[in-house]
Image (cartoon, rainbow, N blue to C red):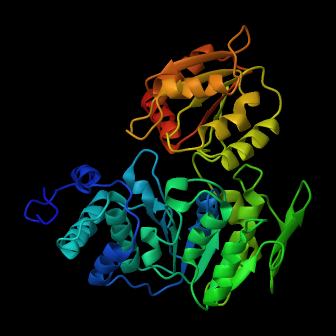
Amino acid sequence: MSNSDTSVKPSNLLEWLSVLETRHSKEIDMGLDRVSHVKNKLDIQYGCPVIMVAGTNGKGSTCAMLEAILMQAGYRVGLYSKPHFLDFNERARINGIPVNDEIFVQVFDQVEAARGDISLTYFEFTTLAICKLLADAPLDVVILEVGLGGRLDAVNVIDADVSIVTSVDIDHVDYLGDTREKIGFEKAGIFRTGKVAICSDPQPPQSLIDHAESIGADLRLFGRDFNYNGDKQQWNFGGREQRRNSLAYPSLRGANQLLNASAVLAALEALRHELPVGAQEVRTGLVMVDLPGRFQVLPGRPTVVLDVAHNPHAAATLAQNLDNMGFHAYTYAVFGSMLDKDIAGVIAQMKDKIDHWCVCDLPLPRAATSEQLLHSLQSAGVLEDKEHSLQKFSNPEDAYTFAMSKAGENDRIVVFGSFLTVAGVMRARRNAQS
């Protein structure tokens, strides 16, 4: 199908996704001109508050907490998050339920008709489709997760009422720059004049602060405009005009979740007149929130941990969380990564936590091969002896099956390095249960 051929339309979601994966010349093609033009033709407008979330790590957790709390408060909530693990439908949820295939096909047809001769990447096309279906749904609030960076990300064609940047660290250097200052500027691109702009990174780059001030955004910084404190039982949030005390810890595990939760409560403070939320609804939402693949500890023995950590910042958090878990005799890793990631930096954070490495290929051309990962581990000084091993596998499923066959009931298996690594293991577990 050529870029301008609309005569033969795919008839189902799988056909549509297959077409979109191969249609555009580049997988990532930064810039908003093409997307903005199609957005205007689609007349995407929101009649409710929009919250946009960007950041190197913590985006998914922040979006999930917002969704859970607002649903507990009785609001009709639309969420766009990415990437998906097993089914594309996971990317768009209305009141916690993934949008069905038929609605996706209808809105894909609308984007196809609107784009004319304009070529769109898979991400741009699907982003426009999801933004359109959420705009047309009867919703009280919409939550949009940025894909890459912020300023030039397709999601940024939408003007948010509240924007959150969760964290700023080194990732996607080919597109965003190689310093926190450059990356901070890119992420600050989601801020809007006169609108609330929240940053929960304890050390925000000066570039982010400067950009927010230069455009006249209402910047709210962690430690200056909002904060938290707590003990082992509960925690408290303090914002500019709102305090919330005796809060339950989020059900999401991990060292940074109170930072993410604080950003969520700062956003709800900013929207307290449009979307009032009570104390009990916050408590229940934090307890009820669920997010696959973010330090997700599965039931049973051996212990299995799924974590999408794919950069040094996230790997450091994962390592800290593993230290807090208690004793395990041996730890096995199922590890696969994209080649453009800081693989050496990830390994540096994790190498002292792992006894047996099961490295794997991933089903994308830009993924690192298991051979490359093996070489990176050896270069980092990871040795093979009676207590340590290195194994290569052609996919995450085989690596996980091997680890399960070797691990004792007092051992643990940590699956990390990429969404695709975690998705492969999720798929293997689903197939084993079906």
Does 188 appear above or below 10? below
Q: Quadrant of residue 236?
A: bottom right
Question: In this view of the protein, which residue sits in the foreground, 129 or 28?
Answer: 28
Percent coordinates x, y for residue 336 in the rendering: 53, 33
- Farthest top residue in view: 386
- Tell me what residue is drawn at x 58 percent, y 66 percent: 54
Q: Quadrant of the C terminus?
A: top left
Does 110 appear above or below 404? below
Does 374 appear above or below 91? above
Does 139 appear above or below 298? below
- Residue 112 lies left or right of residue 147; in this view the side is left
- Tell me what residue is drawn at x 61 percent, y 63 percent: 55
Question: In this view of the protein, which residue sits in the foreground, 50 or 362?
Answer: 362
Q: Quadrant of the N terminus?
A: bottom left
- Farthest left residue in view: 7
Would residue 46 be visible to someone looking at this image? yes
- Tell me what residue is drawn at x 51 percent, y 72 percent: 151
Q: Quadrant of residue 184?
A: bottom right
Percent coordinates x, y for residue 368 in the rendering: 48, 34
- Residue 291 lies left or right of residue 360; in this view the side is right
Would residue 283 be visible to someone looking at this image? no
Percent coordinates x, y for residue 297 in the rendering: 67, 39
Report the number of discs.
0
